[in-house]
Image (cartoon, rainbow, N blue to C red):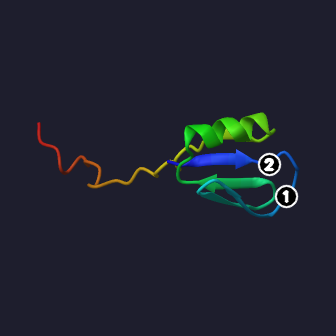
């Protein structure tokens, strides 16, 4: 999944380290794999917006062809 971090400075781009977590911000937003609870609390107190990133929705794929009139028997 991951964690989305929004910087308190709009449009900030750069790499910032919070403890052992390194966040690469692009246009004020960074996504990291995980975030320690203490680091999350620090970021929120410092004005960052921290949210759990939503996984991208997978597109449904059809595994078989739809039944046709010819394929069905009464």
Picture coordinates of residue 31, whole percent (x, y): 63, 54
Residue 48 horizontal side relative to residue 60, left or right: right
Q: Quadrant of residue 46?
A: top right
Q: Nearer the viewer, residue 24 or 21?
A: 21
Residue 12 bears which disc, if any? 1
Q: Secondary structure at mark 2?
A: loop
- Left of 74 or right of it: where is 55? right
Spot the residue most to the right: 10
Tell me the quadrant of the picture where the C terminus can be found: top left
Is residue 44 in sight in this rendering? yes
Q: Are marks 1 and 2 in contact (CB under 8 Å)?
A: yes
Residue 69 spot, x, y in % from top left: 24, 46
Tag count: 2
Marker disc for residue 7? 2
Q: How would you rate the neighbour count of disc 1 (Cα within 10 Å): few for under 14, some for 14-19, many for 20 or more?
A: some
Residue 73 quadrant:
top left
**Picture coordinates of residue 67 (x, y %)?**
25, 48
The residue under the point 57% across, 37% down is 37
Q: Would residue 51 be seen by someone viewing this image from the given angle?
A: no
């Amino acid at each position: 999944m991951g964690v989305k971090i929004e910087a308190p400075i709009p449009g900030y781009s750069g790499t910032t380290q919070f403890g052992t977590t390194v966040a690469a911000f692009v246009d004020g937003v960074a996504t990291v794999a995980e975030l320690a609870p203490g680091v999350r609390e620090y970021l929120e107190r410092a004005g960052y917006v921290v949210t759990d990133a939503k996984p991208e929705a997978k597109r449904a794929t059809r595994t078989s062809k739809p039944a046709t009139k010819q394929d069905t028997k009464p």
